[in-house]
Amino acid sequence: MSRRTSVILAVAAFLVGLFTGGWSVATYYGRYTDRLTINMLDANATVTVAILNRLRAGYTTNAVEILETGLDGDLICLGGFLVHPGELKRDPLTMEAIQMVRDYRLRFPHKSGSPTVDVAASKVFVVTDGTNGNH
């Protein structure tokens, strides 16, 4: 086998491996993100039905508490991205959402009953103007 043939075979094997590896990663990642999205949508639908049932039964306080708890969870998850707060600040929709929640929490202060949750939920507000949501 000539040197030229060996190089062509090596390059071809590399490209096949690269394509196969890329396809495998894309397939795995696609399934993984699909599963995460499905789980999130399942959870959101379940919470929405629970809230709607409480509202229709006249239990507005209970429904508000469920929503406040969900909002705390969302804020804590957003706060997890504060390792790189610049990334949050670069997205105008994210900043608008955080500001909207901050304004809401300033109007309607909420205590979860857990100081740890309250502190964690208010940390995300540092990306607005440095003040917390009056948690």
Image (tube, grey):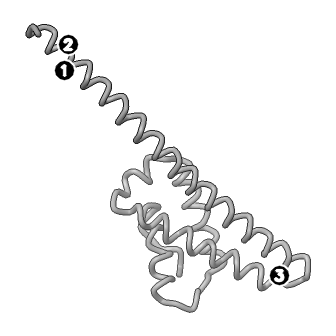
Foreground residue among 86 and 14 = 14
Which of 116/36 is in front? 36
Residue labelled with disc 1: 10
Question: What crowding class fits label 3: few (fewer than 14 Cα within 10 Å), some (14-19), or many (20 or more)?
Answer: some
Q: Report the residue that reaches farthest toward the left.
A: 3
Up/down of 17 relative to 66, above or below: above
> What kind of element bears circle 2?
helix
Nearest the eye: 103 or 91: 91
Q: Residue furthest right?
A: 57
* Marks 3 & 2, CB-CB < 8 Å contact: no
Q: Residue at x 68, y 63 (%)?
A: 42
Horizontal side, residue 121 vs residue 21: left or right: right
Mark sitting on residue 8: 2
Looking at the image, which residue is at 20% across and 13% down? 8
Q: Amino acid at mark 3?
A: Thr
What label does residue 118 carry, if any?
none
Q: What is the number of callouts on the image?
A: 3
